Amino acid sequence: MIITSLLDTDLYKFTMMQVVLHQFPGAQVEYRFKCRNAQNRVGPGAPSLDLAPFVAEIRDEIRSLCSLHFHDAELAYLRSMRFIKSDFVDFLGLFHLNEKYITVTALPSGEIDITIQGPWLHTILFEIPVLAIVNEVYFRNTHKLPDLVEGRRRLDVKIGQLREEGLGDLKIADYGTRRRFSQPWHEEVLRVLSVRLGTGQSPGNAAGTSGQLAGTSNVLFAMKLGLTPLGTMAHEYLQACQALGPRLRDSQIYGFESWAKEYRGDLGIALSDVYGIDAFLRDFDLYFCKLFDGARHDSGDPFSWGERMLAHYSKNRVDPRTKTLIFSDSLTVPRTIELYRQFRGRCQLAFGIGTNLTNDLGYEPLQIVIKMVRCNGQPVAKLSDTPSKNMCDDERYMGYLRQVFEIPQTE
């Protein structure tokens, strides 16, 4: 059984789920799975990335996932977080994932289709554990004797890079649950990082005050290892607001205002790339510059994005040194160090490293996602600064969205 606790997911699933409970309890949604590197080969004679042979095993693991309930200790841990409300924890005490909302199908191409469809409140927690299941099932079948020695060597190199002179204030966080090699390897990585880098100590979404490991997005390991749980909002939240808000053009603004209504200044990191940086900056006005603690980068050139964010704060008479920029797009340790050196002292910084921390044993990782494609029967979409990350099942809607948000067509 791969997933043994419903806490084995990212914190932002709970923070978004609380907003859904309080503000959108009747929303109906649909999510679809995509493997961005499906059918690729990693070299002559190497295994393919076909997932169809593992459908039965994936279904069995999802069935086990749907048998889980929150334990009292897990609920108590969630209740201890200052931004989690008591009625939400009471709801989680009755919650379980229902298998009727998810289907997994093998396709003739060798790929798989995963569709999640039902009430947002009852489907939102599927995404992260299902992706973790797909990863672990794939790797335990294709690499039955994983090269943990190589994985440890690579981790040791990363730690050595982070501990170089002049990098003492550089803090990283683990964002690697969804694409990890396995749950045991994820835990080993976090234990090693905790010991060798030291850990942060502040609750919520701020970086800790000591050590270079600021925390983890994984709530189970945060509880188990005494780490800081990290996370605010994800793309699906702002995508759903396309259908839930009063007017499409104002959906991003509506999403930020609804978030502020729920958390009233806490969890103040805004996601910037659901419509691209240009549309984000048009909506992220003086009010939001002051209201939110910072913004998170997840697509496009991170150096350009950071410079534009700093200029935007200055233009709005907000001192960038009081704001946090979080970088979380396909980071490696060398790229993290480059970004740190460019922006240190000019703003507060945080870095979320995912696949490169939790799935770097020498094998090609799966580039898999599960994204919301419909809400209340209406198409919703993400128009990323990295076009390959766009996901929508209705091209006409994508065109309309580009028109409304003044986003040019990209190749």
Image (spheres, rainbow, N blue to C red):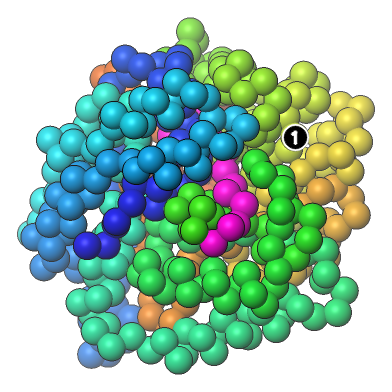
Is 347 positioned to the left or the right of 30 in the image?
A: right
Q: Residue at x 62, y 24 (%)?
A: 263
Q: Amino acid at mark 1?
A: Asp
In the picture, the quarter occupied by the N terminus is bottom left
Is 174 positioned to the left or the right of 66 in the image?
A: right
> Can I make out residue 133 in this image?
yes
- How crowded pointer 1 is (Cα within 10 Å; few <14, some 14-19, many 20+) is rated as many
Q: Residue at x 80, y 21 (%)?
A: 286
Residue position marked by numbered label 1 in the rendering: 293
Query: Which secondary structure lies at badge 1?
Result: loop
- Percent across and percent down for residue 250 are 56, 15
Q: Quadrant of residue 266?
A: top right
> Can I make out residue 282 in this image?
no
Q: Nearer the viewer, residue 177 or 277?
A: 177
* In this view, 355 is above or below 157: above
- Percent across and percent down for residue 385 are 56, 45
Q: Residue at x 29, y 57 (%)?
A: 3
Instruction: Tell me where the magenta segment starts and ends, as one range.
Output: 225-239
- Reply yes or no: does residue 105 show up in magenta: no
